[in-house]
Image: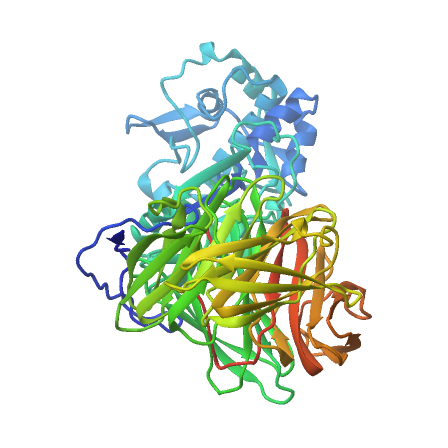
Amino acid sequence: MHRIRWLKIGYACAMIIALVAITIFSFSPQVAERAEAAGGYIIFNGHGRGHGVGMCMAGVYFRALRGETWRTIIPYYYRGVGFGSVDDNRPIRVLCRDGVIRVYTLREYLYRQMEEPDSWPLEGLKVLAIAMRTYAISVINRGKHAAQGFDICSSGSCCQAFDERINPATRPNTVAAVNSTAGIVITYQGSVIVAAYHGCCGGHTAGAEEVWGGSGYPYWTPVPDDACASASGHDWQVILSWSDLEARLNASGDTAVGSLYSLTILSLGRSGRVTKIRISGSRGYKDVSGSLFADRVGLPTNFFSIDDQHFEEYICLQNPSDTQQADCRVTFMLPAGEAPLSFDYAVAPHSRLTIYVNDFVMSREVSTKVESLNGVPIVAERAMYFNYQGRGKKGGHAASGVPQARTNWYLAEGYTGGDFDSYLVMQNPDPSQAAQVTVSYYSRQGIVEEEVYSVAPQSRATVGVDAVPGLSNSEFSASISSTRPVVAERVVYFGGARAGGTSAPGIGELNNEWYFAEGFTGAQFDTYVVIANPDPVNKATVQAVFMLPGGTTKNHVVEVPPQSRGTICVDALPGLSSTDVSTYLHSDIPIAAERAMYFNYRGMAGGHDSAGISTLSSEWYFAEGCTGSNFDTWMCFQNPGEEQAAQVTVTFMLDNGSKITRQLTVNPKSRFSLLVNAEPGMAAASFSIKVNSSIPIAAERSMYFNYRGRDGGSNQSGILAPATTWYFAEGYTGQ
C-alpha cells in the first residue's frame, strides 16, 4: 500500500539573533495536521491580587481574627511609622460616582467607603478606618485633584471606593470603627504617610520599584505575610495556549515581537515579584517590566513564576582541541514557517559548553544545526528530560548529532503497542528546497506500510507512527529515502513500572558487523538487540556473540526475513540471565542494529536505546557527562579482539577547562565498566570525554539520574571523530 501524507511545514528564511521578517512558503496540496509530541501551552503560577504595596487587607482581616489590634497591625505593614491626629469634622470635596462634586466632613466620607464589608471583625475595620483617613489626607496634601476643583474622587483604582448612596445607619460596625479611631492618622517622621493598601499580597508585600518603578517611600518596605495564606486569591494559576499568549502580546505595540519564541524572567524584586521579563520572537526581543507584562497578558499580578516545561532540552558542545577556541553557531529550525534562530558561542580548548535550549525556544518543536565557524572540529550531543504530556512518563534521553544530512536512513527499533508512543522526526536543513521523504515501515512479517512525507526547507516535521495504518499495535523498523538530504530520528515514550523514553538518530549505512559495548541482564534490567533487514529479497543470517566480563562468550543465531525486523531478548538466552554483556553481530548481508534496555537502576526507572557501532576505533568522543546531584555516569568498553588487551586512557574535560585522566585495561573478548562518579575529582562534575586506546575498541556512555523529579537513564555510543557540522532532528521544549 502506498500513501502520500503531506505535512504542512512552512518555509522560513535565515535569521541571526533578532532582526528579520518571516517569509511563508506554501505548497499544494496542504493537508495533514502536524503530529506533535506534546501540547503547546504555558502555565503561570502566581500569588495575590492588587498591586501589593503597603498594607495587605487580607492579612489585616486574619490578623484581627487571631486577636491582633490596630496598634500592632499597622506598624507591621508600614515600617517605622507613628501616629498623629486630624479633625474628622474638616470638610472635603468629593467627586461622587454620579459626577457631582459634594462636600462631606471627613467622618461622613469615611462612613460611606466600600473598601471592605461591614461584617469584618471590628479591629480590622479600625485598621481600615485609620488607613482610609490617612490616605484621604495624603491625597489632599499632595493636591492630587486640586486643579480639577475637588479633593478626592470615588474611584477605588484612583483614590478610594466611595459611594454617596450608602446610608451609614446600615453600616454600624464601620461607623463604630471610624468613631473609635476618631482623627487618628499614620505618620512618618511627623508627616502623614501615603497609606497604600491592596487586597491580598500573596505572602509578601511589594516594594514600589517592583510594581510602579521608582523608590517609593521608606515605610513601604516589603514584608513577609503569613496571615493571608488562607485568603481567596492568595494563589492563582493562569493557563494559556501558546497562540493565545502570542496574540495577547502582539495586541500591544510595547510587547509585540511577532511569532513568539520564548519568555525569560530576567530579574525579581525584593518580594519575589517579576521586575523584568524578556519576550523573544521573530522580530527580536523586548525587555519589559513584570507589571506591564502581567497587564498585557491578563495576569492578576506580577508576582508569578512560569511553570517548568514538561520537556527541557540541552545541547552539549565539546572542544577537544588543546590550543584552539571553537567559534560555534547554533541554529534552531522550527516548524510551521517560523524563522530559524541563530546564536554564536565560544567553546574554550579541551572543555565543554552547555546550552539550555528552553532559554531561546519555548514550547516549540525544534531541530538544531551546530557549526564551527572557524574550522575547529567539535563534538555535539543533545540531552532531553521530560514528563511526556504530563502523564507520568518521566525520564530523559540523549543522542549524538550526525555530521551530515543523508538521503537514506535506517531505524531498527520502534514500538506502538500497549503504553508506547513512537515518533519519527525529520529535519530538512536545505535553505530552499523541500524534501519528499518515503518511509517504509516493516514488522517481523515484512513490509507493513509505505508513506511519503514532505518536509519544507530549513524546517522539521514530526510523524506519530501510532497513527500510521497497520502500525497501531506493532513492533516496527523503518527505511527512509529522501529526494534531498535530511536528518532522521526516532523517539519512543512508554509507561508502566519502568516509564520513560528513548531517542536515537537514524543509521546512515547498513553494515555486516555491529558492536555493542553496553548490556546488562541482572536485577531489574532487560536487554534487547533489534535487527532491521531492509533487503527486499534476501533473508539475513545473523551470528550474535555475547562477551562477558571474564572473557567467556555465548553464541546465538537469528534469521531475519527480507524487509523485516528481528528481536533478540538477551535475558532469555541460556547463561545470560544475570550478567554484564557486550555484543558482537555478524550478518551475511548488510543490516541495521540497535540495542534497547529497560531498567530500574537504584530506583531510577526507565529505558535507553542506541544504534550499534559499525567500526571499532582507537579514539572515541562524548560531549555529555554528569556526576553528582542524583546523576551516575558509567563508561562501558568492549574489546572484541582475540588476543591483545586494550590499554585505554580516559580523559575527562570539565566545563572549567581542566582535565582529569584515568588509565585502564580491557582484556580480550571482554568488557569493562567504569563508574565515573568514583574517580578522584569526578564526584560532582559536568564534563565531556575523550577515549584513547592502544587497539581499536567499542565505547559507550550510560547515565542514570533523577533530574528535577524525572528519573531514568540515557545511553550514547561513542562518536568517532569531531566535525565542523552537527545536526539534531529531534528537540522539544513545551508541555
Identify which residue is drawn at 71% across, 54% down: 576
Q: Is residue 416 left or right of residue 703?
A: left
- Residue 311 percent location from the top left of the image: 51, 52
In this rendering, the answer to whether 642 lies above or below 188 is below
In this rendering, the answer to whether 525 lies above or below 670 is above
| Residue 732 visible to the viewer | no
Of 497 and 292, nearer the camera is 497
Identify which residue is drawn at 47% across, 56% down: 565
- Residue 517 percent location from the top left of the image: 66, 67
- Residue 617 percent location from the top left of the image: 62, 80
Identify which residue is drawn at 52% across, 11% down: 172
Residue sitting farthest toward the left: 28
| Residue 67 visible to the viewer | yes
Total residue callouts: 0
Q: State which quadrant residue 64 falls in.
A: top right
Of 579 and 80, nearer the camera is 579
